[in-house]
Amino acid sequence: MSSPVRLVLILHVVLAAAASLHAAERSGKKTLENAWVGRSVVVKRTLYSVVFDERSRVLPLIKHRDRVSGLTVVTPTGTSYYQFDARRDSEEDIVHHDPNRVVSQMRKQYFRDMHLDIGNVQDIEPLMLVRYSPGVALIVRKVQIGRDRVRVYFHKDGEADLATTLTVKFPTPLSNELTELPLIDDALTRFVTKQ
């Protein structure tokens, strides 16, 4: 067999394997989305969100009001905690086992000097902690798959605004094929029941 023919055969095999891997990756993500997006759920364990105002980094006089960030995070081993994702690259996420402590830390962490040295301004201003107790009905509007986490976005029925999120966080990156689906489903169903 000549070198060019061998090279063409190797390329076909490599391309077929890559296409198969990509299809498996999309298949796992699609399976997860089909299982959750659009579904009604009932809360089994309390979920928390924080409502906050956020100042524009470029124009601090502009404030984005009533933003919502879900705080509840669960690991496949069953550990749960609360986390507010950092808004600046120079800062760490705020993580605690008490959602009230997360909000307290938010009040301290997000200050910066105003332009023209006229004082300090709070970039993130937490307004309230929202609790979704067992028995509350929500709708899954979106599933976001990251490098090492899956975040499910919940809305109240008939409302466009985000109510809360539930994040399943893994200690290692997720597989391309999303073979962790049973672990993800198990973690999610500890907090919510599908209807």
Image: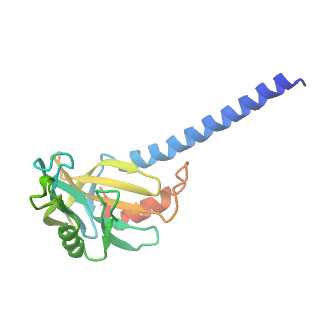
Horizontal and vertical percent position of residue 74: 38, 67
**In-front residue for pair 48/136:** 48
Residue at x-position 49% and y-position 59%: 182
Horizontal and vertical percent position of residue 111: 19, 63
Position of 131 with respect to 193 (left or right) is: left
Residue 23 shows in the view:
yes
Position of 114 with respect to 78 (left or right) is: left
Horizontal and vertical percent position of residue 73: 35, 66
Residue at x-position 47% and y-position 63%: 170
Up/down of 79 relative to 42, above or below: below
Give the quadrant of residue 87. Answer: bottom left
**In-front residue for pair 104/193:** 104
Residue at x-position 16% and y-position 52%: 55
Position of 126 with respect to 142 (left or right) is: left
**In-front residue for pair 74/106:** 106
- Quarter holding the C terminus is bottom left
**Colouring used for the render:** rainbow
**Exactly how many numbered labels are in the figure?**
0
**In-front residue for pair 195/48:** 48
Residue 132 shows in the view:
no
Residue at x-position 83% and y-position 27%: 6
- Quarter holding the N terminus is top right
Position of 71 with respect to 74 (left or right) is: left
Horizontal and vertical percent position of residue 12: 72, 29
The residue furthest right is 1
